[in-house]
Amino acid sequence: MTLNGKIALVTGASSGIGEATAEELAAQGASVVIGARRTDRLAALEERLTARGTKVLSVELDVTNQQSCQAAVQAAVDQFGALDILVNNAGVMLLGSIVGADTTDWTRMINTNVLGLMFMTDAALPHILASKGSIIQVSSVAGRVARLGSGVYNASKWAVGAFSESLRQEVTAHGVRVVLIEPGMVDTELRDHITDPAARKAIAERASQTRQLQASDIANAVVYAVTQPDYVAVNEILIRPTDQVL
Ligand code: NDP
């Protein structure tokens, strides 16, 4: 129980990596604030965690809306009195070609993956500075390697890397740790939301040939980063399935 007494807020906790991360942080003793748009899924997670003795607060959260981000952070602090860990996990991956793209997909990706993460960071920073806490930014291998058919998703995750490194340089002297997590292919519902049928088919085919990571593998990486002694800053964790080349 290495996170006893710590308060963690996880965005996108209604499924996949966010849900697993909330569970793992709770298993380590943290109280958790879980945010997403699908409140029915949050309620089910809250029930499971509460049954195990975790203190949980569910908040309806749309990270693309700055007021919603501020309200979620305020609710967390009102309920628990502090915020030690922010996990900026909410994201969408709407793969597809650049030529002839549905640019509403671009808007959703930039608003969620980039601006949403920035709004949450902005809202949480005063509290994270006060607690000398940690900000976990869920980027992707896609923030390190660009691929055909993934241009705007790549751009969004590249932005996460740049923003987070700049933030790290700004706050590390205040004892705040910024951690960039870069997963390869994880078996979640992320790709089910792709609107371009060809892109959805292509990634499903790649997935079927890969022993994919599980959401819990990424949750374990988050726990590793946030349970190091205060003087150890794990800046970046890149995790691919062994079968994934690029
Ligand atoms: P999921 O689709 O399972 O989870 C995405 C989560 O983000 C959901 O809980 C969803 O909740 C939430 N979300 C989406 N839009 C918003 C929004 N506007 N406001 C609040 N929450 C939102 O996918 P993953 O768990 O795989 O993805 C989590 C993160 O991991 C993403 O940032 C993704 O880019 C990254 N990642 C995933 C990889 C993979 O292979 N799966 C690989 C590398 C990185 P709701 O819809 O209820 O709001």
Image (cartoon, grey):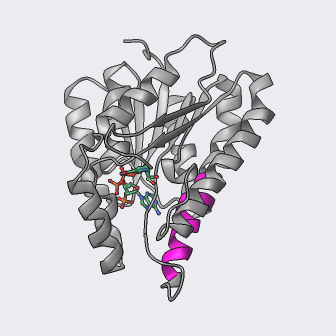
Quadrant (top left/top right/bottom left/bottom right) for the N terminus: top left
Tell me if residue 85 comes above or below residue 156 in the rendering. Answer: above
Res. 132 image quadrant: top right
Relative to 74, say whether 174 is above or below.
Answer: above
- Work out whether residue 133 or residue 226 is closer to the camera in this orientation and state it: 226
Residue 231: where, in percent of width, then height? 66, 12
Q: Give the x, y percent position of residue 199.
A: 35, 73
Identify the main secondary structure in magenta: helix
Is residue 56 toward the left or the right of residue 118 in the image?
Answer: left
Quarter residue 51 falls in = top left
The structure residue drawn at horizontal position 63% and vertical position 41%, both measured from the top left corner, is 124
* In front of the other: 115 or 80: 115
Magenta segment includes 110: yes
Q: Could you tell me if residue 3 is visible in this image?
A: yes
Q: Quadrant of ligand 1?
A: bottom left
Q: Which residues are magenta?
A: 104-117
